């Protein structure tokens, strides 16, 4: 599965949009982009996934570049409860998840 | 059940003892995964079960680690002769990887925090 690169940390103001970047320049055609987050002392939680089209659900939006080499997770209105480590993962369907270091997001009031 | 459950939630053991960690996946989920997370680190894949196929054991760190799964139900992760470096949170996840499945979201349990003294 392709490797991903994320910034180690970022701060965000409560109520503002949080844009989390991820680079996956070695992604192959059958690999999906997944985002999970892990709130302190909890197991990871699925957020969203996509293949090549932009996706939106009740939690977030996922913007994937046309060449699929990078993506951005958007939390439209960050709340204090969104403070967590966010993991961008690229993998083919059915394969295990390989978690990197993620981005530690701190939402500040 | 409503979600993935794991037991015990916390386990403290002495170095050299064996431990068993249990995972109850979501009913009907065909795939089950074990991960390990050391303090302040990301998740490390340990082992993956899919239906009746041979498990993917490529992440097990040593032969002291083993896991079993009965059908598509409960799984047990066993660590023999525990060492202090085994101290971590052990997470279990399950997903439905049925025929024709293109995307399979993994649902995680709360984890078992293992402390080896």
Image (cartoon, coloured by chain):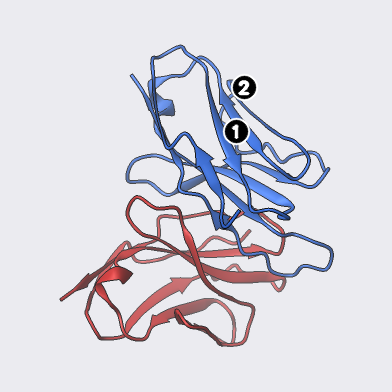
Chain colours: A red, B blue
Q: Do the residues indicated by labels 1 and 2 lie within the same chain of the protein?
A: yes
Residue B41 lies, with reference to residue A15, above or below; the image says: above
Q: Hey, which quadrant is residue A84 in on the image?
A: bottom left
Q: Could you say which disc has been placed on residue B63 in the image? A: 2
Which sits in the foreground, B41 or A22?
Answer: B41
Find residue B54 and report its horizontal and vertical position in percent. 80, 39
Residue B56 lies, with reference to residue A89, above or below; the image says: above
Find residue B11 and report its horizontal and vertical position in percent. 41, 28
Callout 2 secondary element: loop
Residue at image position (78%, 40%) is: B71
Q: Is residue B73 in view from this perspective?
A: yes
> Would residue B8 appear left or right of B93 to someone viewing this image?
left
Which sits in the foreground, A93 or B20?
Answer: B20
Residue at image position (82%, 43%) is: B53
Q: Is residue A64 in view from this perspective?
A: no
Residue A33 lies, with reference to residue B94, above or below; the image says: below
Callout 1 secondary element: loop
Query: On the image, numbered disc 1 is attached to which residue?
Result: B60
């Amino acid at each position: 599965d392709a490797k991903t690169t994320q910034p180690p940390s970022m701060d965000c103001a409560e109520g503002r949009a949080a844009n989390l970047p991820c680079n996956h320049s070695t992604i192959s055609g059958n690999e999906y982009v997944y985002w999970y987050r892990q709130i302190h002392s909890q197991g990871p939680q699925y957020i969203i996934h996509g293949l090549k089209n932009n996706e939106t659900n009740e939690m977030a939006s996922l913007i994937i570049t046309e060449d699929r080499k990078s993506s951005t997770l958007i939390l439209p209105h960050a709340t204090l409860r969104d403070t967590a480590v966010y993991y961008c993962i690229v993998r083919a369907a059915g394969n295990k998840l390989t978690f990197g270091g993620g981005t530690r997001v701190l939402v500040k009031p | 059940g409503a979600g993935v459950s794991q037991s015990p939630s916390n386990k403290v053991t002495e170095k050299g003892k064996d431990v068993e960690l249990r995972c109850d996946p979501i009913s009907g989920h065909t795939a089950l995964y074990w991960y390990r997370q050391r303090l302040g680190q990301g998740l490390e894949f340990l082992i993956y079960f899919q239906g009746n196929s041979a498990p993917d054991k490529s992440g097990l760190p040593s032969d002291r680690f083993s896991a079993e799964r009965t059908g598509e139900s409960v799984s047990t992760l066993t660590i023999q002769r525990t060492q202090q470096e085994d101290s971590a949170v052990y997470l279990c996840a399950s997903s439905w990887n049925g025929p024709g499945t293109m995307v399979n979201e993994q649902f995680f349990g709360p984890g078992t925090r293992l402390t080896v003294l």
